[in-house]
Image (tube, helix red, strand yellow):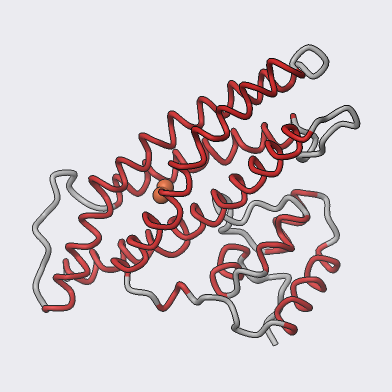
Amino acid sequence: MQDLHTAIVGQLVSDNYRTAAVFSKYKIDFCCNGNRTVEEACAQKKVDAGLVAGELSAVLAIQPETGTDYNTWQPDTLADHIVNRHHSYVATQIPALQAYLHKLSSVHGGAHPELLTIGRLFNESAAELTMHMKKEELILFPYIRQMTAAQETGSKAAAPHFGAVGGPIAMMMHEHNQEGERFRQIQALSNDYRVPPDGCNTYRVTYALLKEFQDDLHLHIHLENNILFPKAADLEGRQAS
Ligand SMILES: [Fe+2]
Ligand SMILES: [Fe+2]
């Protein structure tokens, strides 16, 4: 049995995505800051590591290997999945959420001024994420597909104009951190997406959608930072040797 105290947070989620629910519960970041042990992450959040390890082991025991094992996927398949599932989700949810937040601010902004800040932060995130996904779709992911195809035929992908894959990966990871941080602010401002007693149905729908958007973003960033990007760097390294 694996010692869950010293296990790496991002790796646990890679191996079994259901462990993400435990980390989310204790507000432990498993995507951008996933490269830490459970013990380190718990110490930082002042959470009892034994408690978290216990809940993790319960999740691992009840649901052995029933989640999708993205680790076994080829990098090009994973890139396609990320675009089809997560990029399209972000693109369709942005206008809907902007409309809800706009309406909510105009109705409840007087009594709940934090809604104006949440709306501004979400608009910033929407603009940044739209550009970010374009960079992945037009620059990084096509190169990952080329490397995967070259690997299958035993050839080498043409050298990319950006030199090496580490450059765009570092930039994407930096942008992931920024959006992770922006959503942490939204989460805090919304009191963890808790609708106030005077909140209407639009309030409930907006907060539920915002929470879902953040959860999806965490899985999306996790798939890129912890699975796709290391696979891409590994492929490039193998083709260079
Ligand atoms: Fe992405
Ligand atoms: Fe990304």
Q: Judge by depth and name the residue closer to the eye, 163 or 128.
A: 128
Quarter of the image containing the N terminus? bottom right
Q: Judge by depth and name the residue closer to the eye, 127 or 198.
A: 198
- Give the tally of numbered discs: 0
* Above or below: residue 53 compared with residue 24: below
Question: Quadrant of residue 9 in the image?
Answer: bottom right
Q: Position of residue 230 (x, y in %)?
A: 38, 63
Quarter of the image containing the C terminus? bottom left
Q: Position of residue 38 (x, y in %)?
A: 70, 64
**Residue found 49% across the figure and 32% down from its top:** 95
* Residue extending farthest front: 201
State left or right for residue 232 relative to residue 14.
left
Q: Judge by depth and name the residue closer to the eye, 230 or 65.
A: 65
* Residue extending farthest right: 197
**Residue found 26% across the figure and 53% down from its top:** 165
Q: Position of residue 23 (x, y in %)?
A: 71, 59
Question: Quadrant of residue 58 in the image?
Answer: bottom right
* Residue extending farthest top: 110
* Above or below: residue 171 compared with residue 146: above
State left or right for residue 11 relative to residue 129.
right
* Above or below: residue 201 compared with residue 86: above
Q: Position of residue 131 (x, y in %)?
A: 36, 34
State left or right for residue 43 relative to residue 116.
right
**Residue found 65% across the figure and 25% down from its top:** 118
State left or right for residue 11 relative to residue 64.
left
